[in-house]
Image: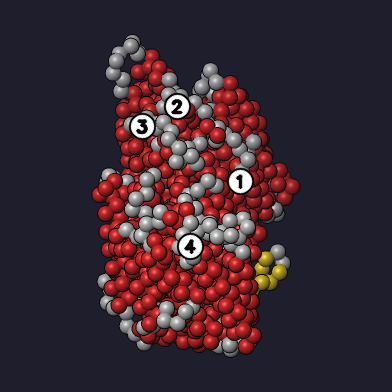
Amino acid sequence: MNHHLISLTLVFPLIGALLQTVVQVPRSRWIALASSLAASICAVILIVSMQNQNADLQMTELLPWVGSYAISYDMAVDGLNALLMILIAILFPVLIASEWDQKVGVRGMQGLLLVLQASLFGAACAQDLFLQFFFWGVSALPLYFLVGIWGGEGREKAAFKTMVAGSLGDALIFSALILIYYSLDPHTFSLRELAGGKLAGKEFNFLGFELSVSHVAFMLMSAGLSLRAPIWPLHGWFTEVSQEAPSSVFVALCAGVVPVSLYLFSRYCYVLFPDALGSAYKWIVGVGILNLFVGGICAMAQRGLRRLLAFICLSEVGLVLMGIGSLNPVGVVGSVYQQLMMGLGLAGFGLFSGIIADRTGSSWFMDENRERVLGGIVTRAPVVAVISGLIVASLMGFPGFGGFVGHALIIIGSYSIHPLTVIISGGALVLASYYLFTMYRLIFLGGVNERSAGFEDLTLRERAYMLPVVLSLLFFGLYPKPLIELIRPTVLTVLSAVK
Amino acid sequence: MKEFVYIMPEILIALTLAFVIASEITYEGEQLRLVTAISLLGLGAAFFYAVYSYQFGPTPVFSGVLCLDGFSLFFKLIFIALAALSIASVGQTAEINPGRRTEYVALVLAASLAMCLVSSAADVILAYLSLLFLNIVSYFLAAFGRKSLLSTEAGVKYLAFGSVAGALFLYSLAILFAYTHSLNIYEIHKHLLAQPLPPQVMLVVFMFMLLALSFQIGAFPMYLVTPDVMEGSPTPVAAFLSVGARAAGFAIAVRFLIVIFTQPGMTEGHWEVLGGIDWTQIFAVVAGLTMMVGSLLALKQESVKRLVGYLVVAETGFMMMGLLVLDQVGIAALLYNLVIQLFALTGIFYVLSFVFDQVQSDRIQDLRGLLKRSVFECGCLIAFLLCLVGSPPFPGFIGKFTLIGTVIGSGRYPLALVGILAMVLSTVAVARLSYHLVGDFKKSLAPLTSQWARKAYLTVLVIPMTLAGIFAGLVLKGAGESLGFIFW
């Protein structure tokens, strides 16, 4: 059955982005919102109409693209990427609504956000390596312009660094891609055909050394993705972007692009390199723990909301990596679930910190001496305080919220690797509760001072876009069953290839 | 007489050229001049005739002096399209003085006539003469901005390098003639198959030819002149030469290197090195050096035109990869890249010439905040630049993939690694440029004046470029089929 729903999720935002170049301002914003929402509705219909208990790729759309190189337009969803569709569907209409009052070049900004939405939908659904990389490469460009044009003081430098890191990362993935393509005969990019360890045992000769295709390609791809998602030693550009980018753009990065890159990593691991994963899973978990901890410790030291968000993102990435490397059905299901939840949680955090920064003039909540500079917002603006409290609770992994399900599954799953990982990740969660609660206390509780005195509560528009984020965090936290049933069959199937 | 039908595109261009020259001689100050329109009509007729000529199949013309085959027709289409684009933009730039437009049109037509001859020459003398014809016209074009020191310098440097390259080319052909007593490359090929040259002589012939061609395509040892020409000559000329002169060089390089230095391999569409030396190794080293030198030097440039000049050098290195694997897939990839560059480079230089007219500078510093000042043009500029260096959403990426892919397919992993590194470096060079273009967006800067004709021209470039990406399969298939009835 083919409804072309996946293609519609790409087409609507692109049409919206094109219309931004011709339609004038008041109307252009409605067009942007409408096209983004239309794509999101298609994505939601797509997910709702997926069959449960089915591990296969569904809703396939297949067209030849570059025939002579066996590249095809092959889009499909299964348990690994279905949740990302929901995430992107919720995220982008919210972001477009949050940039409603942008003063400078609102059409350009919303157009670029729409292009980003389309490219992330594409990267999430593509089942052809070339096509997937194509969309993944496209997603780097709108971010570059969004940071470079609408960012803060050092925006151009931050954008330049992003571009350099991104193009280096993409080049690494690209080289892995060509290596994989030419190692099989007949040459193919199709993930369906490459699935199930077809690359195992293939070797190539580089300057006289016999190297294993799957190991080299696995390393190239992980290194390439780690330059697009924040992984501990290579996260310099990410924190710089967090400082300079407008809050909505940074949300698009850490709640949109980062989960997609984690998804790509898991897809590559399980589908392309089950043999390399057998020896590399310990490294993945190791990097995950390192990120979880470094992210947590660095987050404790932050005085500003922006960098705090960056380091929370770092530690969330670490947690998801732990789940991916656990090779245990519970842990892997948790990591897939957590991709959605980290996206929603970080998006909520980014949005309310953007609102606070807008109203109080800066995103600092401590001064140089680590003394409080804000406070008492709860009495001035109870709605902001409640919404922020719910989001923070989800990020801490408080029971009843989406974050809890993901955290719990990953930690339970990681027990199979080593009991120590449970202790370490539990410790990191305690750390997270500490710094998140400190932040919350310093901003919302306590006495009112002059910076927070004139704080106004959320407007109707702001309530309208915060609501979907918070509601979905609550809903998926209280009733995760349908989503988990969607993920589980696919995870069990891909894991059977690893063992 | 029948054979004139086969060279109809050239005849049409020559007639148009004659008309343009006649109209310049008889010009007496009339208000309305139709030179541009008439030459566009002539080129359009030549274009359609070239498309029509595909049905003739591979045919030797004038007892094998020229050969009409898919390969030469593909190049002819590129050259004619390039000349038409170049002439269509002449009215919109202040760098070409309105009083000298006809002169410029005549030079462009002459150059495109020469290029068409180069692409179909199978006789060494004709190849040499048409290449020289092209180069002499190019010297005039490079020095077209007579009042500008840089332009004169570009012309003189081009002349100096060009004469050395011409001499080397002639010398290598002379050695071949001395051994084989034949002027036709296909006959030379037969002689060499029967009686191979001593490897040392073959090496000398190859090195001379490589040096000569490296001037034409802007490859490693002779690349030095390319950025000077790109920077010094008027911007429309830079656009024309950066695509045209290089493409002509590649036409000669593919035909001569494949015919003279290889023999058909075991499988269809593959060739093997002929004679004792494996020249593809030398070629690979030159390609790698060209890519690295071009993309590294592009990182440091202050003049945008020069920066693009170095990017062009790097692109040459990439396209050499398509030739050195010695199979049809590689050459089809080369042709595909040429099509992409036709649109990308024309577009880049077109926007730069528009900016140069208004800002009177092509320093990176002076272009700061360009995006704010003219969103559409600057957006197109960045898109063309990213397309040139092969950034993913643009068709240039598919081009780079096909080139690097063929190299990996033939097992040359180190070269592919160098290629990917050069791709990253040139992307960084473009990112550095767009860092300045995008900068100062929030400041209020005076917008540049724009006309609808300019936007229309850019749209005309963007649409086929996008289509070449979306229908990359068709374009690659067309290129492959053009090679299918080449005449080896």
Q: CA distance from mark 3 to mark 1?
A: 32 Å
Picture residue at 36% right of the left edge, 60% below the top: A457
**Residue A260 located left or right of residue A221:** left
**Front-most of residues A123 and B440:** B440
Disc 4 crowd, CA 10 A, few/some/many (<14, 14-19, 20+)? some
- Quarter of the image for the C terminus of chain A: give it: bottom right
Which residue is the site of mark 1?
Answer: B295
Residue B163: which quarter of the image?
top right
Q: Which residue is mark 3?
A: B450
What is the CA distance from the residue labelled 4 to the residue labelled 2?
A: 61 Å
Label 4 sits on residue: A447
The answer for how far apart the CA atoms under marks 4 and 3 are is 57 Å
Q: Inspect the image, locate mark 4, and give the three-letter code of the amino acid beneath it.
A: Gly
Residue B357 is labelled as 2
SS for callout 4: loop
Gap in angstroms between the C-alphas marked 3 and 2? 11 Å
